[in-house]
Amino acid sequence: MVRFKLNGKEKAFDGDPDMPLLWYLRDIAQLTGTKFGCGMALCGACTVHQNGAAIRSCSTPMKEVGGSDITTIEGIAPMHPVQTAWMEIRVPQCGYCQTGQIMQAIAFLKENKNPSDQDIDVAMAGNLCRCGTYQRIRAAIHEAAKLQAKETA
Amino acid sequence: MKLIENVSHDVKRDFGQGVSRRGFLHGALVGGVFVLSARFIPEPLWAAEGEAAAPPFEPSLWMSIASDGTVTIVAHRSEMGCGSRTALPLVVADELDADWSKVKIEQAIGDPKYGEQDTDGSHSVRSNFDLMRQVGATGRVMLISAAAAQWGVSPKDCTTEPHFVVHRASGRKLGYGEVAAAAAKLPVPKKEDVALKERSQWRYIGKESNSLFDLPEIVTGTAIFGMDATMPGMVFASVEHPPVLGQKVKSYDDKDALKVPGVQKTLTIDVFKPPHLFQPLGGVAVIADNTWAAFKGRKSLKIEWDSSPNSVYNSGPYRKILEATSRKPCKLVRNVGDVDAAFAQSSKAGGKIIEAEYYAPHLAHASMEPPVAVAEYRDGKVLAWAPTQNPQAVQETIAGVLGIKKEDVTCHVTLLGGGFGRKSKPDQVAEAAVLSKQVGKPVKVVWSREDDIHFDFFHSVAAMYMKAAIGADGKPTAWLMRTVYPPIGSTFDVSAVYADDEMGLGWNNLPFDIPNHRAENGPADYHVRIGWLRSVANIYHAFAIHSFADELAHNAHKDSVQYLLELIGSPRIVALDLKGDEAEDAKNYPLDTARLRRVVEMVAEKSGWGKGSTGKGRGFGIAAHRSFLTYVATVVEVEIDSRGQVHIPNVWTALDAGTVVSPDNVRNQFEGAAVFGTSLALFGEITATNGVIDQSNFNNYQVTRMNRAPRHVDVQIVKSDAPPAGVGEPGVPPFAPALYNAVFAATGKRVRELPLSKTKLA
């Protein structure tokens, strides 16, 4: 039995311990905001937070989830400054990768409150967007950093 | 009325089963099940039902207004990231003079009553702009008439402001919801009695404030893509497809697969009957309680496959065949003057002849959402939910495969996690329907990324041969070009070897002012499924044409932009010999070199062309290409580091797409096209060994990441009153040649094959 917290709620899972967190979230917990893109931690569409850090849920088996706090996009109270910035900059095209991008950006901005372009490139290089919205993602992360600074000021 | 009836019917049938659609319905879920109640479409505005001479123009098909003022507009095109689901309703809302915040969008099912629904070819806005304007304007006239009757005044004395009819003299107002019921009883006015707004009166069309309708749902993770669609009681399926196109299952052992917890059973899917169309490929399906169990079970299958003639497919030798074909005379596509005579004359006079060959490999679409669908077969009917660009093709494909009537297939369209042409082909939806018939439950088929890349409808591999005779002024007196590749037509006709349908994609319409010109197309056999990929044959056609143009410029010791303008020549309408749809398009959208020159001049100015230093690892390149009736010029700046890695500090694009509905979204499309272009120019390559595709995931089929993407993309939109043209695809074709021309400027190396990663630059 794997026990953990999902978006603040206690959960228990007694299925296949090799099942990636992604498929638990999508097929069992029915939280579909976290997306399947590659299954190999190559694209970042499945990004969620484990104890506040961004992880790829497609490559995190349930047996490694025990005792941790998992937060998905559904556990982020809208509108988080990152989401607000995404709206203002009008980042998305198809939108499929964007929840993963947003989860990655939220975790990143906790560590780096005033990132440079290069910091952003490094932090976001694991998140693919086939529509090619990178320029807007970068702009939105700068914008979110500003919004967060205002919030805490 | 039809729409209302159909929706109600579907509601009973579909929503009673709890199909999740919260993405479209903005949180209007009741106990987890959305009930399409009076709130959204309580009273039809349009009373066409029962009228003997119902006009062919049916506004009721496209919109309705509720008594609370909610305007529901039907989106009949799919949303895969290009913005048509927002753009077309915006056009209706503008002419209706609706308040956009009171507009709901209802995604249409696949049905011929909406006309053509294949969201491809960058034509959603172009082909529907006039109709959507008319729908909205007709509604506005009827609302005005209803309000005027209530006040006992002439409709001529009334006008509208967003969501209100206003009597000018008295200032009285009635909300759209208040007069909807009365308006519904009025006859639908004739087209000639409906005045469209002046362009200056548009509130939404062309405005910077427009943003995607689904934006809030996307950023909160509540938008529903195909991957997120569910049906109660559904099971999950993952399909092991034949590694080589056309292989059948000879035998298989599922003993170990069935031991995997959660695996229920395995089933076979028959191989397609040629031509493959959009039929399932065949193979062995693992049915399971969840996606993971299905994936895991599949890994334990032991399958012996039959042989297929396509196992001869090896990319290296196949390239040589294409190239050999391109060196010999091929089928004539377009002829101007006499190239043979011009080449002969040039040789005699000791003139210069330049030849070059270009090559581009297969590409995979690799949209972020792999193919996926959920379908239920019950009592000879199929209900499907799919991220499809073409719900009517879903109906046709499933009907064909299961031997049922097309009308008995209902296809709902979710949001698409990217499409790029892959999702015009609904083979995975047919798999779900076929499996559901066998299982007796709704089935969700999920393709892995490996499935997606192995079993794509690939962008074609292509070889191009170019030859020019150069006059004393450095300009070509003759230009011959041949293109050879397996055609998309092979998907529909096993004997198709010529790419007749792709010639309009940058090959039969060279806009250059050259007295002798011949375009040809050579035959090629297919061994994998070939399909449309964002901008299609324009990719390799533009690559060859604009690389070659730049080669000629260099040869003539001329500046690339100046030379390109000389090639384009004076402002004129280029005479083209076109047939069918292309001839129709040419009437409203003649090939106008003034517009092409303008985007070249604009992008040159914006990029500071000729002012930056070039050579020593830094360079600028240009290409200009018209596709999907939109004129685009792109300048790419490259920096090549000591390891030979290419960096792209800047891209400038200027485009003339005629009338634009949402400028910010158009800029987003062209910014994205630069990234898509970077992927195919730097990394994109699909190859086959003995008929099996060599690439499988993003580790060996790379697409651009943020750190390799152009650092800054500047997009300039020409302000134009011309009819709207395409925006989803046209940004892609000029990118690769502009990049390669920049690499030449930076290094002196002329690379003639895609992708650039195959050539060492340091």
Image (cartoon, rainbow, N blue to C red):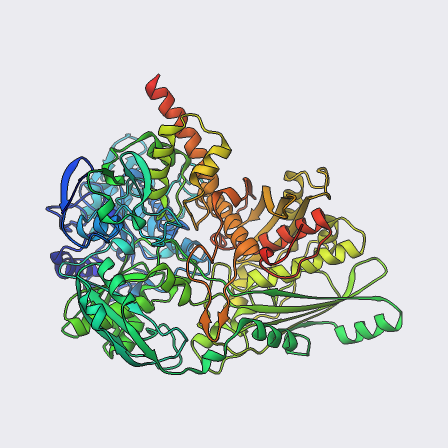
Residue B420 lies left or right of residue B74; in this view the side is right
Query: In the image, what residue occupies the spot 36% across and 60% down?
Result: B389
Query: In the image, what residue occupies the spot 76% across and 54% down?
Result: B553
Query: From this viewpoint, is residue B564 visible?
Result: yes
Give whichever of B440, B683 is nearer the camera: B683
Give whichever of B303, B104 is nearer the camera: B303
Residue B482 rendering spot, x and y as whole percentages: 65, 71
* Location of the N terminus of chain B (image quadrant): bottom left
Q: Residue furthest top?
A: A153
Query: From this viewpoint, is residue B160 visible?
Result: no
**Number of numbered labels in the structure image:** 0
Residue B41 lies left or right of residue B139; in this view the side is left
Give whichever of B305, B269 is nearer the camera: B305
Residue B605 rendering spot, x and y as whole percentages: 67, 40
Query: In the image, what residue occupies the spot 53% across and 67% down?
Result: B582
- Residue B289 to residue A130: above or below: below
- Residue B4 to residue B659: above or below: below
Residue A2 rendering spot, x and y as whole percentages: 16, 45
Residue B747 lies left or right of residue B74; in this view the side is right
Residue B652 rendering spot, x and y as whole percentages: 59, 43
Q: Quadrant of residue B426?
A: bottom left
